[in-house]
Amino acid sequence: MTLPAVLLAAIFCFRPILLTALAAMFGSWVITLDPIFSGLAWSFIFGLFAPTAFSLLVVPVIYYLLASRKTSPPVKDGA
């Protein structure tokens, strides 16, 4: 039951998260042409990229692993 729920949540959340992050990244792309604020712009772009990838890939996988571990049947001792 957890895998379909995780996949459905990932499908619904993928587009808004990605579009918001890409809009902010492309919006700050212009600042990279400025010699003074170029470093700030690059750190902002990659600072948005890392959490976006984390929230779209790592969080659903960790949630699925923890939820499937919790719902697995307990192991009985053979005595």
Image (spheres, rainbow, N blue to C red):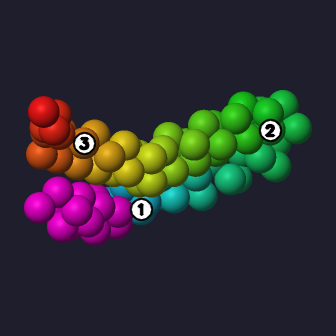
**Magenta segment range?**
1-15
- The amino acid type, in three-letter code, at marker 1 is Leu
Q: Residue placed at 77% from the left, 46% from the top?
A: 32
Residue drawn at point x = 38 percent, y = 51 percent = 61
For residue 79, side relative to residue 36 (left or right): left
Residue drawn 70% across the image and 52% down it:
30
Exactly how many numbered labels are in the figure?
A: 3
Decide which of 57, 70 is in the foreground and name it: 70
**Split into 4 quadrants, where in the image is the C terminus?**
top left
Closer-to-camera residue (13/78)? 78
Could you tell me if residue 68 is visible in this image?
yes
Nearer to us: label 1 or label 2: 1
- Mark drawn on residue 69: 3
- Indicate the position of residue 6 as horizontal and vertical percent values: 23, 58
What numbered label is drawn on residue 38?
2
Position of residue 55 measured from the top left corner of the image (x, y, whole percent): 41, 46
Residue 26 drawn at (x, y percent) = 60, 58
Residue kind at label 3, given as amino acid type: Arg
The image quarter containing residue 9 is: bottom left
- Disc assigned to residue 19: 1
Percent of width and height locating residue 19: 41, 62
